[in-house]
């Protein structure tokens, strides 16, 4: 599997989440929110800034999209 190379929009999302751990990301479908959020969460956990994370999403996305994207 190729390594993750974030787009400019994803870099902005990651920076925003890292600077404001309690935030919302509103972006269009297909913009890379899932990957960017996953990277940002890993960064915040590594820095010890968060332990738990609550992500709200439609059931279909949480059950069918995320397992594939986070694998």
Image (spheres, grey):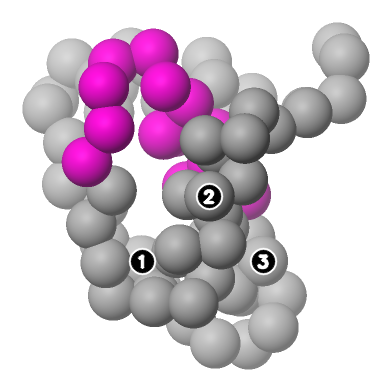
Between disc 2 and disc 3, the foreground one is 2
Q: Earlier in the sequence, mark 2 or mark 1?
A: 2
Residue ID at (41%, 34%): 33
- Residue 62 x, y percent position in the rendering: 27, 28
Q: Quadrant of residue 6?
A: top right
- Residue 58 x, y percent position in the rendering: 12, 27
Residue ID at (86%, 12%): 1
Report the residue marked by disc 2: 12
**Residue 38 seen in the figure:** no
Between disc 1 and disc 3, the foreground one is 3
Q: Is residue 61 left or right of residue 71?
A: left
Q: Quadrant of residue 29?
A: top left
71 and 49: which one is in front? 49
Q: Is residue 34 left or right of residue 23?
A: right
Q: Which residues are magenta?
A: 26-39
Cα gap from disc 2 to disc 1, whole angstroms? 20 Å
Q: How many marks?
A: 3
Which of the labelled discs sits on residue 66, or is there none? none
Which of the labelled discs sits on residue 43, or is there none? 3
- Residue 44 x, y percent position in the rendering: 59, 73
Tag 1's secondary structure?
A: loop
Q: Is residue 50 left or right of residue 58?
A: right
Report the residue marked by disc 1: 53
5 and 62: which one is in front? 5
Vertical comparison of 49 with 11: above or below:
below
Between disc 2 and disc 1, the foreground one is 2
């Amino acid at each position: 599997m190729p390594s993750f190379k974030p787009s400019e929009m994803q870099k902005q999302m990651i920076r925003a989440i890292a600077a404001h751990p309690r935030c919302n990301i509103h972006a269009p479908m297909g913009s890379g929110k899932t990957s960017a959020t996953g990277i940002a969460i890993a960064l915040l956990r590594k820095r010890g800034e968060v332990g738990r994370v609550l992500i709200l999403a439609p059931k279909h996305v949480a059950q069918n999209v995320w397992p594939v994207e986070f694998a």
